[in-house]
Image (cartoon, helix red, strand yellow):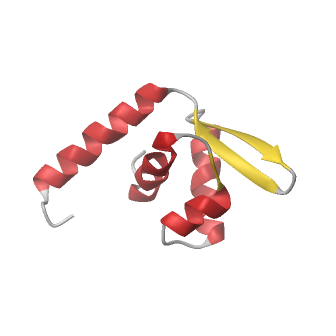
Amino acid sequence: MSASMRLKILACLGDGEQNVSYLLGKIATTQPNMSQHLSTLHRARILGKRRDGIQIFYRVIDQRVLEICRVVCAHVERADPRL
């Protein structure tokens, strides 16, 4: 979770499972970069995934991770209000 991109991904998945296309529409990055971060989060067992046809859907496995994400983001905002 040290990369800001991973925090953005977790924030997008906070309301539930989403596919990669949705995430790319919400987060300004390339598909290869998104895939790399999703793969890292999946290997770390932070995200689960399932395939439905050609779509891959990701979800947060442990909701406590989202609380950690919220705390980190709030701390960063207090440290630098420009963010």
Residue placed furthest toward the front: 15
Q: Quadrant of the N terminus?
A: top left
Q: Position of residue 29 (x, y in %)?
A: 53, 71
Residue at position x 49%, y 41% in the image = 15
Q: Position of residue 34 (x, y in %)?
A: 59, 62
Is 81 rendered above or below residue 13? below
Side of 51 where 17 appears, left or right:
left
Front residue of 15/27: it is 15
Residue at position x 65%, y 49% in the image = 39
Q: Quadrant of the C terminus?
A: bottom left
Side of 68 where 65 appears, left or right:
right
**Quarter location, residue 64:** top left
Q: Position of residue 67 (x, y in %)?
A: 35, 32
Q: Position of residue 37 (x, y in %)?
A: 57, 55
Front residue of 39/26: it is 26
Is 81 rendered above or below residue 39? below
Residue at position x 65%, y 58% in the image = 20
Side of 18 where 51 appears, left or right:
right
Side of 61 where 54 appears, left or right:
right
Residue placed furthest toward the right: 53
Front residue of 43/65: it is 65
Residue at position x 43%, y 32% in the image = 65
